Amino acid sequence: MVDNVEKLIPTDQCRRCGACVVACPVKAVTLKEYHAKVIGCTGCSSYSEGLCVEACPITADYSILEKRVFGRLRKDDEGFGIYRRVYKAISLHPILRKEAYGGGTASALTYAALSSGFVDAAIICSWGDGEPWRPGPKIIRDPKDVVLGLGSKYFPSPNLRALKELGDAKRVLFVGLPCHIIALRKMQYSDKPSLQKLTQRIRVILGTFCGIPAMLTAESFAKYVSEKGVPLDKITRVTTACASLLKGIRTYRVHTTAGQVDFSVLMLLRDLQKERLRCDENCFDYSSDLADLSVGGTIPPELPPRYLSNALFVRTTAGEELLEIAKRSRLIGTRKMGSLFLRGLRLFPPYWRKRNRYRQYRKERDAV
């Protein structure tokens, strides 16, 4: 067993950011002193680097991946990556629209893919069964199970681990954050057969936006709620809720056998600052630019439901096929996104943070 990431990757390359937690395709590693140590690593490769390092999104050559996926590099004015069309979209499924955190577009697309037979299974992120406060990957085959993945989560989830548990599924939809998508593309175009085999059944990749300053760890969250008087063995599930601006835009709603307790995400990020993963500080992908379809929130969820919508970027042929299926099934409603609204997306600070990192990356790469 390898318990120190320095044995797998040179010190000058490792950012101590925790990206290996989301990128490990073989075993869901857990963290202890996450800047240096990874507990649970199997040292799975006979090479000098493990598969988690092979899939690491932070060390990916992004330009090569972009060329492989789209055939070219993005232009300077393509801040949201390369795409064919962009829409304002919203779920038309009554349950998904009601329970979704934003417009429910990602959930509706997943529902459409499963119900139409476009895919046999979907890999989504859901709250854990044995440990309800820990998000993790879940393979679903029934469209009704899409509700298990509703809501935003601000914890690392090793979604790639589910690739080796697909069973007889031959066509799979993968839903993930930009870090998951980069790792998945890196695996698809790897020269290692073991990684290619894990990803060969992926038919369409659905990416979501990510602009949070850092991720919490499930361990720190569990400790935090315990100290606030919520017994872990009484927790039945955790959901994401929308609160007022005074209480915090986003909250975790912890459901227990005795009732429910809300914890502001903003307060958690403040109180658990030293326990957070720093993977976002090294990432420059805001809008899942390597996915087939990218979905992100555009309207604050505190507004009435009639104002909710998502930005939907269609990037590839596979993405176009899935969107057409969802529209024919009346599961997705789309409107053309005007230039003014698209410019408004660029007002979010996370967009500019990651955009500036990408420019620095291109500058350094072009100088080589």
Image (spheres, helix red, strand yellow):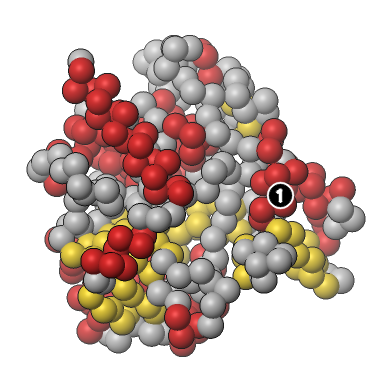
Q: Where, by quadrant of the figure, is residue 74 drawn?
A: top left
Residue drawn where x is 87% and y is 71% of the image: 258
Residue 47 in percent (x, y) is at 37, 15
Mark 1, residue position:
268
294 and 360: which is toward the camera? 360
Q: Quadrant of residue 334?
A: bottom left
> Residue 123 versus residue 177: which sits nearer the camera?
177
Q: Is residue 74 left or right of residue 181?
A: left
**Placement of 236 over or under 95, stated as above or below:** above
Identify which residue is drawn at 30% across, 60% down. 343
Q: Quadrant of the N terminus?
A: top right
Q: Measured along the vertical axis of the image, is residue 102 above or below residue 60?
A: below
Which x, y percent locates residue 124?
45, 59
**Residue 268: where, in percent of width, then height?**
71, 49
Judge from the rendering whether residue 67 lies leftward or rightward of residue 104; answer left or right: left
Q: Residues within 10 Å of mark 1 (few under 14, many from 20)?
A: some
Furthest residue toward left: 71
Q: Secondary structure at mark 1?
A: helix
Q: How many numbered badges does the structure rendering display?
A: 1
| Image vertical order of residue 310 relative to residue 81, above or below | below
- Amino acid at circle 1: Leu
Q: Nearer the viewer, residue 177 or 368?
A: 368
**In this view, 199 is above or below 205:** above
Assign the C terminus to one quadrant of the image.
top left
Q: Quadrant of residue 52?
A: top left
Q: Please indicate whether residue 195 sits to the left or right of residue 24 in the image.
A: left
Q: Residue at x 22, y 84 (%)?
A: 328
